Image (tube, helix red, strand yellow):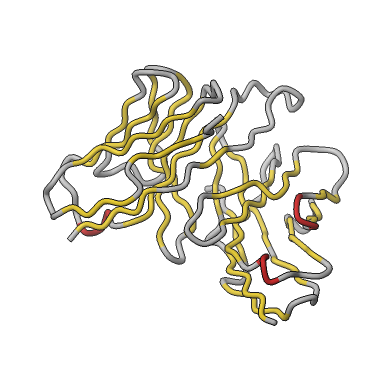
Amino acid sequence: AQSVTQLDSQVPVFEEAPVELRCNYSSSVSVYLFWYVQYPNQGLQLLLKYLSGSTLVKGINGFEAEFNKSQTSFHLRKPSVHISDTAEYFCAHKVGYSTLTFGKGTMLLVSP
Amino acid sequence: NAGVTQTPKFRVLKTGQSMTLLCAQDMNHEYMYWYRQDPGMGLRLIHYSVGEGTTAKGEVPDGYNVSRLKKQNFLLGLESAAPSQTSVYFCASSYVDDGLAAASSYEQYFGPGTRLTVT
């Protein structure tokens, strides 16, 4: 079965520090990958997506992710985080007929 | 555009009661989805629909039924609620998956969620 693994359930960082949230997916013929963000008590919002082309994908709020086919990874990065980036982040992989498989989420906790 | 809306926002049920959650979208999306979110479990797909009048089972369909009588609405029903169905439920919608990346971004647009507690 297709799966998405987010290696860290929680990542604490200080404000203005860099951060990387890790995601690995199970290999498949077609690879469409997404990162979503969920702020407290809200729905999910798309941060960025990889469909094809450049392996470095830029998203909103200064986030970027790199697709690595050989390592089946799609890690999310930001060079300098803000308090307002505190949220839960979900990696997702499109499988089947337009359905997504989500990872279990990584809680990013930014402190002053 | 309101996007994806969900009704109600909160609900408390007693075991054995029934209820229907309503999802509505005004983006003319063909596809709609119902997920549940539980701590440490991420989002799990309950049911989805690829068009009016069609539905399909997702990863965790047991105990739920759905209907898509109108393109813009997707209803999730619990016939006999159980405490294990205590969760936050999210609806989402997306464009047609026609295999053309230029025409379809595969992005799913999410509603704000419904927090359901079954006692």
Quarter of the rendering containing residue B5: top left
Q: Position of residue A88 (x, y in %)?
A: 58, 63
Q: Is residue A58 above or below residue B54?
A: below
Q: Nearer the viewer, residue A94 or B31?
A: B31
Viewer-proximal residue among A108 and B57 = A108
From the top left corner, tell me how far across and down residue B32 is, in percent: 47, 31
- Residue A39 in the image: x percent, y percent? 56, 59
Q: Is residue B45 left or right of residue A49?
A: left
Q: Residue at x 57, y 32 (%)?
A: A98
Q: Is residue B99 above or below residue B64?
A: above
Q: Position of residue B61 (x, y in %)?
A: 33, 42
User: Image quadrant for the N terminus of chain B?
Assistant: top right
In the figure, residue B18 lies in which quadrant?
top left
A68 up-or-down from B110: above or below = below
Quadrant where the C terminus of chain B is found in the figure: bottom left
Left or right of residue A55: residue A81: left
Identify which residue is drawn at 80% across, 75% down: A16
Residue lying at 33% horizontally and 32% vertically, measured from the top left: B75
The residue at the far left in this view is B16
Image position of B15 (left or right of A55): left
> On the image, which quarter does residue B49 sit in?
top left
Q: Residue at x 38, y 18 (%)?
A: B70
The residue closer to the viewer here, A55 or A38, is: A38
